[in-house]
Image (spheres, helix red, strand yellow):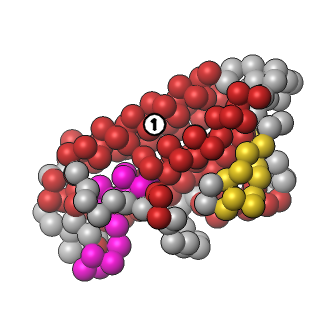
Amino acid sequence: MSDQISLTRDEYLDSIRQAKASAAEFGEKLTMTQMTWQPGGGERWSVAECLDHLAAATTVILDAMQPAISQARPGVDASRFRTSGFLSKKIVSDTEPPPRTKLPAPANIRPRPTLNPEGILPRFLESMDRLSAVVASTAGKDLNAVRFRLPPFPLLRITAGSGLLLTAAHVRRHLWQAGQVTEDPDFPH
């Protein structure tokens, strides 16, 4: 077993393109009733709530990470994002779908109760565009050498490279979750 999880910058940008395509497919194939339907009698998130959560979480993490990114210097490890040790590898691995552990979302990234369903997909796509722009702007910078405080766990400092890997895993996790909503036997057709 490798002691790191890593992606090249190009692989990372591809994962963002795939996430946008998956979300756009929800928008093309689902009605607004289907987008907002909650499985489990409202105990679990709808497709729209998954996308809303991802847009909020990506924004919060990028806001926390950007000061560290601005301090990153050129480096030999600049073309690859990697986890920086056991803890960051575990956090990223545990975030991948299907979820093995569930934690309640902090209030600032929970889906909003007054959801504007029509605005959610564009908001998600904008957050992915911002993530792409940030990643593209880091060419030549070693993001594995600068750290930031992870907003949900302010005592935890991880590298910006680990933070980007965590963000990508988080996006995959909740897009997977959104896909599971559409597979629910009670999903409206």
Q: Position of residue 168 (x, y in %)?
A: 57, 46
Whether residue 78 is visible to the viewer of this picture, yes or no, is no
Q: Residue at x 25, y 80 (%)?
A: 41
Q: Position of residue 94 (x, y in %)?
A: 64, 64
Whether residue 170 is visible to the viewer of this picture, yes or no, is yes
Q: Residue at x 83, y 59 (%)?
A: 86
In this view, 75 is above or below 102: above
Q: Position of residue 101 (x, y in %)?
A: 59, 73
- Secondary structure beneath dot 1 equals helix
Residue wearing tag 1: 128
Q: Which of the 4 image quadrants contains residue 137?
A: top right
Q: Nearer the viewer, residue 66 or 92?
A: 66
Q: Is residue 14 magenta?
A: no
In this view, 181 is above or below 158: below
Circle 1 packing at 10 Å, graded few (<14), some (14-19), many (20+), is many
Count of marks placed on residues = 1
In this view, 103 is above or below 69: below
Q: Is residue 47 magenta?
A: yes
Residue 36 as seen in the image, left or right of residue 108:
left
- Magenta stretch prevailing secondary structure: helix
Q: Which of the 4 image quadrants contains residue 187?
A: bottom left
Q: Position of residue 45 (x, y in %)?
A: 34, 67
Q: Residue at x 21, y 42 (%)?
A: 28
Residue 141 as seen in the image, left or right of residue 39:
right
Which amino acid does the dot numbered 1 rest on?
Met
Q: Residue at x 77, y 28 (%)?
A: 72
Q: Which of the 4 image quadrants contains residue 174?
A: bottom left
Residue 115 as seen in the image, left or right of residue 5:
left
Which quadrant holds the C terminus?
bottom left
Range drawn in magenta: 40-54
Which quadrant holds the N terminus?
bottom right
